[in-house]
Image (cartoon, helix red, strand yellow):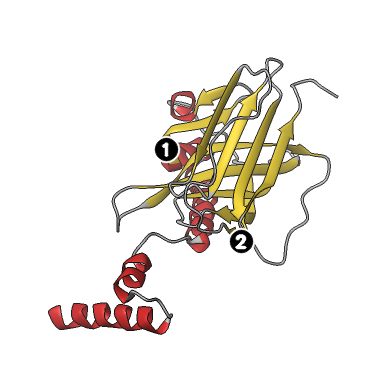
Amino acid sequence: MKHAMGAVLLAGLLASCASGSSDPRERFYRSLAPRANPSAVIATELAFAREAREEGQWTAFREFAAEDAVMFVPEAVNARDWLSGREDPPEPVQWQPHQVWSSCDGSLSVTRGAWQRPDGSTGYFTTVWRREGRRGDEEYRWVLDQGDVLAEPLPKPDIIRTTVADCGGDALTPVAPPIVAAANGAGRSRDGSLAYAWVVASDLSRTLTVRMLIDGEVEEVLRSEVAAPGAS
């Protein structure tokens, strides 16, 4: 085992040398830093959807939620409180991820995709995923889930698109949109390369924005606006 570990360390150092770094040790230790893993986020989203089908919709939402997860009903609520003791519907909503945005370090990701209800209605969802747990034993938990009905279903992509932010240090601040709100919240990845913000206005309309560092610039990559209940 010790010989195997030594070989791994040596291989890491040699790879760092080959990359052209003036300090191989620095390059090697950087390689140990957390990295984006969109495939793991997609796998978690698919497992979430599968559990909803097999074990029940709200059972799955409880199982995958972070302690501070937020959902909209349509007011913003703590998801675990709202879901506590709630019975699963006879047939669950079904959903499929279409796109993933990830921070450089993989600590925060956002998925967007399509959903279908048993009554035939369709819509889109946006879910924010945060990586939690101890190093080597981490898993993704959702911290925000929202969406809306669509008149036409989202077109199914050929592949699930993934976008990973640049590694740029403390680039983004989690500042909510500057409008009069009944409630709002925000968050960002540990490395500051991906941030989100949501706001619920007094009429219960809401806005979710996602920003990330791309090619050295902060770009808004997603904006979701949901009208007030009953609005035409």
Mark linked to residue 66: 1
Tag in front: 2 or 1: 2
Q: Position of residue 66 (x, y in %)?
A: 42, 38
Q: Can residue 118 be seen in this view?
A: no
Left or right placement of residue 126 versus residue 1 in this view: right
> Which residue lies under the disc numbered 2?
162
* Residue at the front extreme of this rendering: 22
Q: Crowding at label 1, few (<14), some or many (≥20) Cα neighbours within 10 Å?
A: many
Rendered residue at 44%/24% (across/down) = 81
Rendered residue at 54%/58% (across/down) = 42
Q: Is residue 181 visible?
A: yes
Left or right placement of residue 78 versus residue 216 in this view: left
Q: Is mark 2 on a helix, strand or loop?
A: strand
Q: Position of residue 198 (x, y in %)?
A: 61, 31
- Mark 2 in CB contact with mark 1 (< 8 angstroms): no
Tally of numbered discs = 2
